[in-house]
Amino acid sequence: MSIAITSQVVELTNAIRARIESRFDKLNRRNIVLINPHVVIQKEGLNYLVEAKAGVPNDTLFAQAEHEDLYAAINDLGHKLERQLSRYAEKPLSQRTTATPAVTTEEE
């Protein structure tokens, strides 16, 4: 999977790229295709702000994490995306989609 990584403040090293790719590899365990994943790394004050956007069939995942350590921010971002992907994967299994309306019978 190719992940677009953008940063104007931080130089993208092989270690940063490897950490981001390893987090996205964990998302592939759900066997849901991620469409055009894009990660943006910014620095605001003393903290790093990491944002990620990835398309999934009929929806889009977006998460952002902020931390003073870049690698911790990437890990937080990965956890947030995992939770969103988990909710997306289990949504068809929820009871509200399988619930049928109550049928009322009129007695005469």
Image (cartoon, grey):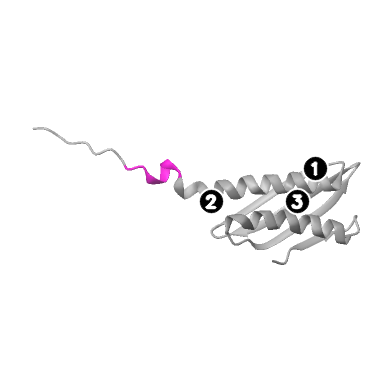
Circle nearer the N terminus (1, 2):
1
Residue at figure coordinates x 86%, y 61% from the top left: 14
Instruction: State the residue position of label 3.
Output: 51
Residue 43 image position (x, y, % from top left): 87, 48
Viewer-side label of 2, 3: 2
Q: Quadrant of residue 22?
A: bottom right
The residue at the far left in this view is 108
Question: At numbered mark 3, what does the secondary structure look like: helix, strand or loop?
Answer: strand
Residue 24 image position (x, y, % from top left): 70, 56
Is the residue 87 above or below the residue 5 in the image?
above
CA distance for labels 1 and 2: 26 Å
**Mark 2 near mark 3, Cβ–Cβ under 8 Å?**
no
* Image: magenta residue range: 94-100
Asked whether 68 falls inside the magenta stretch, the response is no
Residue 70 image position (x, y, % from top left): 85, 47
Asked whether 98 falls inside the magenta stretch, the response is yes
Instruction: State the residue position of label 1.
Output: 66
Residue at figure coordinates x 55%, y 60% from the top left: 57
Which image quarter holds the C terminus? top left
The residue at the far bottom in this view is 2
Q: Can residue 39 be seen in this view?
A: no
Question: At numbered mark 1, what does the secondary structure look like: helix, strand or loop?
Answer: strand
Q: Can residue 107 be seen in this view?
A: yes
CA distance for labels 2 and 3: 21 Å
Please give left or right for residue 104 compared with residue 4 in the image.
Answer: left
Q: Residue 89 carries which label?
A: 2
Q: Amino acid type of disc 2? A: Ala
Q: Amino acid type of disc 1? A: Glu
Residue at figure coordinates x 91%, y 41% from the top left: 46
